[in-house]
Image (cartoon, coloured by chain):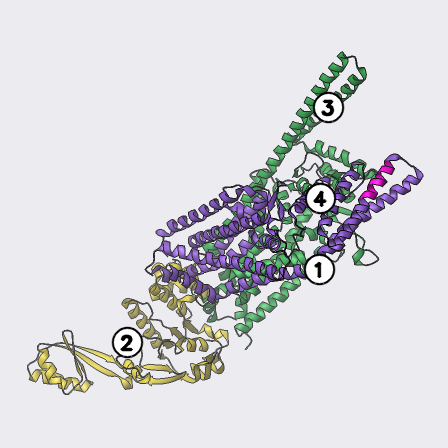
Amino acid sequence: MNTFRFECKKLRKKKTTWLAFFITLIGIIGFYLFHLSVAEKIHQKNIAWLDYLSQMFASNAETAALDKKKAEEAGDTEKAEEFHNMMVSFQKSSENAKQDKEYFANEEWTYLIEEDIRSLEPLIEDSAFSAHYIEDQPISMFTVRATLEEKQRLQKYDIVPFIQNTTYTNYLPTIYDDFSGSTLEEWEKITERYGRFGFYFLYQLIQSYFLPIIVLIGVFLFGNGISSESGKKKKGLHFYATLPFSKGRLFFAKYASGLLYTLGFTFMMLLTPIVTSLFFKGVGSLKYPVLVYDGSEPSPYGSHYNALDPKNDTFHFIELQDYFLKVLFFSIILVIFLYSCYFLLSLFIKNPGINIILLGSMTFVGMKFFPKVYNPFTYVDIHKIITREIATIQFNPAIEYQTGMILLFVVSLIITFISYRFFAHRNRLFQ
Amino acid sequence: MTRLIQFEWKKMIRTKFYILFLLLSVLFVSGLFLRNFLLQEEIVNKKIEKFSEYRKDILSQVVTYQKMMEDFPSPELEEKIEAGLLVYRALNQLIESIEDGNWKEELQYEIQVYELAMDYKKIEGQFKLSEKDMQKEIQLNEELLKRGLAKEDLDLSINPPIFLKKIVTFFFHTFGFLILLFLLTIYITREFEEHSIQIAFTLPVSKSRYIISKFLSLFSAGFIWWIAIFGVSYLLTTLFGTSQENSLVYPLFTQSGNFLDIGDYLWQAIGYSILFLSFAISLLVFFGFLLRNTIVTSLLVFVLLIGNHLVLREDITALFNPFSYQQIDFIILKEPTYYSMGLVVIFCATVITLIFTILLNKRRGI
Amino acid sequence: MAILSVSNLSKSYKKHLVLDEIELTIDGPGIWALVGPNGTGKTTFLNVITNILPADSGTVEMLGKSNKDPSIFKQVSFLQDNSILFDYLTGYDHLKYVCDVNQIPKTRVQEVAEYVGMENYLHKLVGNYSLGMKQHLLLAMSLVNHPKLLFLDEPLNGLDPTSSILMRKILRELADQGTTILLSSHNLAEIDRVTKQILFLKDGKLIEKDLSEHEITFYHFIVSNQTKAMELLSDKYETDNIPNGLKVQLSNHQLNTVIDLFKEHQIDIFDIEKEVTGSEKLYQEIFEVGEES
C-alpha cells in the first residue's frame, strides 16, 4: 500500500501529468465550443432558409395576385381563378414557412416535431404509399419507422432534438439506408446531427470514438510506470530493488496506480463536455431516445444470402441515461483492457511514442476490419455494440454488450498476468 | 552545420525505430500495390456486377409493366416498357464491351445507358443512380473520350499516377503525419529528458544553429520517408503496373465539379506534402524545445492536428491557415486554386515557427 | 554467522566475464573498500550481490539470509548512483517512502536529514539538487533503516571537501557502531583516510589486501635551511622538494633520527606533518600502472 501511495504521489507530482491533463481538457472544451458554433450556424441557416422561403412564396403570391388582376381585367375568369388558387396556395406556403421560421427561431420544437410526425405517419400506415425520396433514391422503411418512433418519444417527454442541416423532416439515419453517389452525400449532410447540450454532445462524441481516444491518451500518460524507470539513464526501478518488499508488490503498485489515474482521467474527460455545457446551453435531457436494432433473421440459405429486411426488422429505443450507464461501466473495462495492453507493450518497448502508435493502430484496425465475437477490439466501438449495429450488420447476435464486457475483462486479466510473468522473469522474482 | 546534421542522423539510425518505420511504410506501399495487382481482374468483375445489377433491376420493372399491360393496357405503360427496354439493351451492349475490353465502346455505351436511363426516369421509371450522378459520369466519360483515355478504378488502379494519388490519400493526411511526428518527437525531447542536450549546449555552436540543424535533420528524415513512399510507388507501378499514354492528363473531379488533370493533382500533392512536412516538423521542434517532454509534446501536436482535422471535416478551409493543408487530397480537390499561395502560406508558417523557436530558446537555459 | 558471504559468484555480459567465481567473507563490522579501474565491474559486483542484477552462478548471503529474500533490506542498505532518484519529488518524499516501507516512524526523516546535513533543502524538488545534495539524500535514504550492512557505490562522487569530511565521519561512526560497510571508489586518497581493508577487483577476481601492511609514511618538514636538509637526507631516504619544504619517506623510529640529525646541523624545524599512503602504490603494483600513465 505504501508503494502504491508513493506511485500515486509520483504521478500527481509530475508537472507533465497536469500539463497533459489541461491540454486534453482545453482540447475538449475547444471542440465543444466549435461544435456549438457550427450547430448555431446551421440553426441560423435553417431559420434564414425558412425566411427566404416565406418571402419567396409571398412574392410569388403577389405575382399571382397581379396575374389574377390582369386576367380579371381581361375578363378571363378561368385564368383568374387559376391564379387565385395559386395565390392562395403561395400565401399558405408563405404562412407555413413563416410559422416554421418562428418555431425554429423560438425553438418551439414541439410544433416542429408534430409536423414531422404528421408527415411520417401516412408513410407507415400505407406502405404501398412508398417512402420519401432523397433526390431519386428512397429512404428505407426502417429509417422512416425508427424516425417516427423517435419523434413520438421526443413529443411524449418534451425533449429538445438535435440540430440538423434541414428544415424538413429530421430523419434518424440507420444502417438500413442504402444510398449512393451524390444522394449519399446529401443524406449524410441532412442527417448529420449537432448536439448543443452536454449530454447530447457527449453522446455524439462517443459515436466518434471519443472513448478509445481518451483512454489511449490516458494510458499514454499513465502507462509508462515501469518503462520510464528502467532506462539506462533513469534507473528508478533500482531504487525499489533494495527495499524490503517483494518486487511482485512493486508490479501491482505500479500497475494499479497507473490504472487508477487512467480511470480518473477518463472519467474527468467524459465529464468535461457536460460541465462545460452548463456554462452555455445546459446539459439536455437524459431521456433522449437511443435507437437499438433488434437484428435481422439470417437467411436459411447461408450467410452469403443474408439481407436486412427494412419492412419487418424490429427495433426499440433505450433512454440516453441507460446508454450512458452502459458506457460508464464499459469505460472501466476498456480502460483496464487498453491499459493492460499498453503496460505489456511498454515492458518491451521503452519509447512511449512507438507504443501508442502500435496500440492505436491495433485498436483501430481491430475495431474497423475484423468484427468478430472473439476479437476484443470489436467492442471498442461501444456505441455500435450498445445499439447492436455491428451484431445486426454481421448477423451475429453474439456480438453484444455483456460478451464484450466479459471478453475484455478476461483478456485484460490474461495480458496482465503475462505482463506480471514477464516482469517477474526479468526481475527474477521466482528464483 | 553538416556535422551536426550527420550526428543527428547517426542517433536516429542507431535507435532503429526510424529505419523500422521506413521499412514498414515501404512494406505497406508494396502490400497495397500487390493487392491492387492481384485484384486487376476484380475491376472488370466489379463493373460487370454493377451493371448486371442495374440490368436485373430494369428487367424486373419491365416484366412487371408487361404484366400490368396485359391487365390494364395504357400508352404510358407502353412508353415505360419501351424506354426500359432501351436501357436494358444499352446495358447489354455496355456489359459486352466491358467483357471485350473495348474501353472506347465501354465509355460510349455507358454514356448511352445514362442518357436513356434519364429519359426512363422522366417517365417515372426507376433507376438506381440519381440524375446528378449520371450527369457527372457522362461528363467524365465524354472528357475521357476527348482525351483518349480509358476509365480507371481510382481504388484498384496500378496505373502510376492513379496509384500515386491513392498513396497521397493514404499517407499524406492527418493520421499519416501524426504517426510520423509521434515517431520523431523522441529525437528532440528525449535529449532533454536524459539531459544529453547538455552536450550540444556546451559545443561551440549557437542555439539557433542547433535548433536549425535539429529541424533540418528531422525534416530530412521526413523527406526520406516521403521519397521512400513516392519512390517505391512510382517504381512498382512503372515496372509492374499498367500504363496509358497521356495518363498524366487523366481528369479528376474537383469538389466544385470541374476537372483537374491528375498531373496537376500530383504536382500540387508533391508541393503540399513536402511543405506541410516541413511545417509539421517545425511545429514539433517548437513544442519539443518549449515543453521538453515526449508525452506532452506528442499530446499537444495530436490535439492541434486532430482539432484542425475536425474543423476540416466541417468543410471549413482557409487559405491562410497552414493546418488546412494537412488533408492533402481534400484541399487539392476542394480548393485547387489555393495552390501557389498555399505553398507560400505553409512556407511562411514554417519559417515563423522556427523563428519563434529560436527566439524562445535564446535566453533559456537547459 | 558471516555478515556477508559471497561464494563462487560469476557474472558475464555477453562473452565478457566481469566477475569470475568470486569468494568473499566478511565476518565483522568495519569498512571495506572496493577498488578497481573504470569498467572492471565494481558497480556490477555491488548490483549482483544486492540482487539488482542476476548472477550467472554462485550464492550470496547477508546476515544469514539469501540475497534473494527482499526482507534482508530491512537491515541492509545500498547507496546507488543518483539516476534512481525522481526529479519531480522532494527529498522528504523519498525519505518518507523509505521510512514507510521499512515501517519506521516518520520522525526518522528529520533525524536522518539532520544527521547528513540536508535539512535545509529537504523539501525542495530533487530536480533542483546539486550533485552533492543528491549524494546527501542517497546517504540519508540508506541510513533510514539503521543498516547492519551498508553498500555504497561511489559515495564520495561530487562531494565538496566539507561534505567529504562529513561523509568520512559518518562512515567511521557507523563502523564504530557496528555497521559493516562496503564502498566502491576511485578516490584512493579518500580511501586511505577511511579504511585499511581493500578489495581490488582485477580480471573478475577479488584481491584482498590490508593496507596497514603496505603503509608508507611521509613526513613534511618545514625547515630553516631546506638546501642543507636536502643534502643531508637525500642519500639515506627517499626525499622530495615540495613547496616550502621537504617530503621524506620515513618509518616512525626513523623520524627521531632525522630530528636529531637536523639538531646536530643546526637546522630549525618549523613544522612537521605526517602523511600516510599506500593504496596508490599498491594499486600501481596490482594493476601494473606506471607513474607516467
Labels 4 and 1 positioned on one and the same chain = yes
Query: Pointer 1: what residue?
Result: A372
Judged from this view, the residue extending furthest toward the right is B71
Given the image, on which type of amino acid does mark 2 rest?
A: Ala
Q: Position of residue B201 (x, y in %)?
A: 35, 59
Tell me, yes or no, whether the two marked residues, 4 and 3, touch with CB atoms within 8 Å. no
Kindly identify the residue that appears in the image at 79 percent across and 51 percent down.
B52
Q: CA distance from mark 1 to mark 2?
A: 71 Å
Quadrant into which the N terminus of chain C falls: bottom left
Q: Subunit of mark 2?
A: C
Q: Position of residue C155 (x, y in %)?
A: 35, 71
Mark 3 surroundings: few (<14), some (14-19) or many (≥20) residues within 10 A: many
Label whose residue precedes the other's in the sequence (4 or 1): 4
Given the image, on which type of amino acid does mark 1 rest?
A: Lys
Kindly identify the residue that appears in the image at 15 percent across and 87 percent down.
C236
Q: Quadrant of residue C237?
A: bottom left
Q: Nearer the viewer, mark 1 or mark 3?
A: 3
Magenta span of residues: B76-86
Label whose residue precedes the other's in the sequence (1 or 3): 3
Is residue C119 shown above or below A156?
A: below
